Image (cartoon, rainbow, N blue to C red):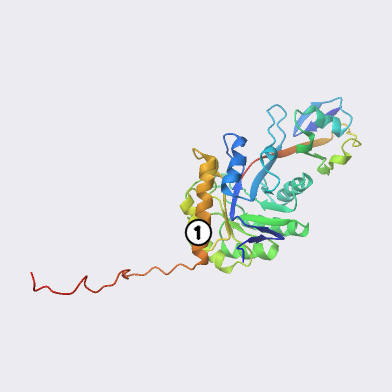
């Protein structure tokens, strides 16, 4: 049976979500999507810059890839709903990554507002994927509010510090009935593999790919890491032990004959 | 007529939302428009008449994570 990821009514073969932020040029994006195999990519909404040059980010994303608009810039649940409605009006479908942030230093999501936004958006027929500060009770509250998946952060966005919240993420994975997508802070393929080995259902990687020397090459590295980690999880890794356990037979090489020499 | 477009006051001769969007140097299909916090669907832009002091938001997709 194929190992697919189900989010709401949709199914994905790839467990690597990517983002469109921070690329030196959006022309990297098609190759990143090809090399990563990613089937879901985030986009943001902003006011039209009436003077600046106008690249349409959507022109770089093939139609086969699912758009995941985020609500970045929202400080309250109401603002998140307004942004999500605009994204839906733009033809984005019902998926939305809820992002409600008030803390402008660490950029940690406000879980209470995020729960509220999740409920409001689920009621409006959206498929909400809330980005959250990794707090297990909040993850359950999001699930109850109608989240189609929860997206706890590994470490602060763009920090490349990996799974600093590993214990909390492990508890969230253990308890969650909806998919868990580790989002933010994943700076290296080994971080992505670690999240997948722990049983995360997917990871979202943007900065580490977009700001690398070769985004397409790094996208491929992350794709391999996610698949490796997923496969390791499915094949149940053995426990870590306190003492050694020999991999080769422990009997003497030929025979015990100390007295010959 | 005076409008507030993306938070800035501006003077315009445009009488419909479609005309206002056409003034921007971008593909009109890539823009979502709100007038006084109500989303105006693409098919209604041509018929949508702007009034003095309307608050217009023109929004589009950009890169983000």
Q: Is residue B34 above or below residue A192?
A: above
User: x, y percentage for residue A77?
Assistant: 70, 52
- Position of the N terminus of chain A, as image quadrant, is bottom right
User: x, y percentage for residue A168?
Assistant: 52, 62
Front-most of B53 and A127? Answer: A127
List the residue tagged with mark 1: A229
Pointer 1 local density, CA inside 10 Å: few below 14, some 14–19, many at least 20: many
In this rendering, position of residue A67 left or right of residue B1: left
Front-most of A152 and A232? Answer: A232
Q: Chain of mark 1?
A: A
User: x, y percentage for residue B61?
Assistant: 70, 40
- Position of the C terminus of chain A, as image quadrant, is bottom left
Quarter where residue A34 is shown: top right
Camera sees residue B21: yes
User: x, y percentage for residue A152?
Assistant: 57, 57
Q: Residue at x 75, y 51 (%)?
A: A93
Q: Residue at x 56, y 46 (%)?
A: A35
The total number of labels drawn is 1
Q: Residue at x 75, y 34 (%)?
A: B7
Quarter where residue B12 is shown: top right
Q: Is residue A142 above or below residue B1?
A: below
Camera sees residue A162: no
Front-most of A138 and A31? Answer: A31
Dot 1: element = helix
């Amino acid at each position: 049976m194929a190992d697919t990821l189900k989010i709401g009514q949709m199914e994905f073969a790839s467990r690597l979500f990517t983002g469109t932020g921070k690329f030196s040029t959006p022309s990297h994006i098609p190759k990143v999507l090809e090399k990563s195999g990613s089937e879901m990519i985030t986009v943001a909404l902003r006011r039209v810059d009436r003077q600046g040059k106008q690249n349409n980010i959507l022109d770089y994303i093939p139609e086969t890839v699912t758009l995941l608009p985020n609500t970045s810039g929202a400080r309250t649940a109401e603002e998140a709903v307004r942004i999500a409605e605009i994204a839906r009006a733009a033809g984005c479908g019902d998926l939305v990554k809820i992002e409600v942030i008030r803390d402008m230093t660490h950029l940690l999501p406000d879980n209470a507002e995020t729960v509220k936004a999740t409920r409001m958006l689920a009621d409006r027929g959206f498929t909400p994927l809330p980005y959250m500060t990794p707090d297990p009770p909040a993850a359950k509250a999001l699930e109850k509010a109608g989240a189609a998946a929860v997206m706890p952060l590994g470490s602060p966005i763009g920090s490349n510090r990996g799974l600093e919240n590993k214990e909390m993420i492990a508890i969230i994975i253990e308890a969650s009935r909806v998919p868990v997508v580790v989002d933010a802070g994943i700076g290296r393929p080994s971080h992505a593999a670690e999240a997948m080995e722990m049983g995360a259902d997917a990871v979202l990687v943007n900065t580490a790919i977009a700001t690398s020397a070769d985004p397409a090459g790094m996208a491929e590295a992350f794709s391999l890491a996610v698949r490796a980690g997923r496969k390791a999880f499915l094949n149940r890794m053995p426990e870590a032990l306190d003492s050694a356990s020999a991999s080769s037979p422990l009997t003497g090489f030929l025979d015990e004959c100390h007295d010959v020499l | 007529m005076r409008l507030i477009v993306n938070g800035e006051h501006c003077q315009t001769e445009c009488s419909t939302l479609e005309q206002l969007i056409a003034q921007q140097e971008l593909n009109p299909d890539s823009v979502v428009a709100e007038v006084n916090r109500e989303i105006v669907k693409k098919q209604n832009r041509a018929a949508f008449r702007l009034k003095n002091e309307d608050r217009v938001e023109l929004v589009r997709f950009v890169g983000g994570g």
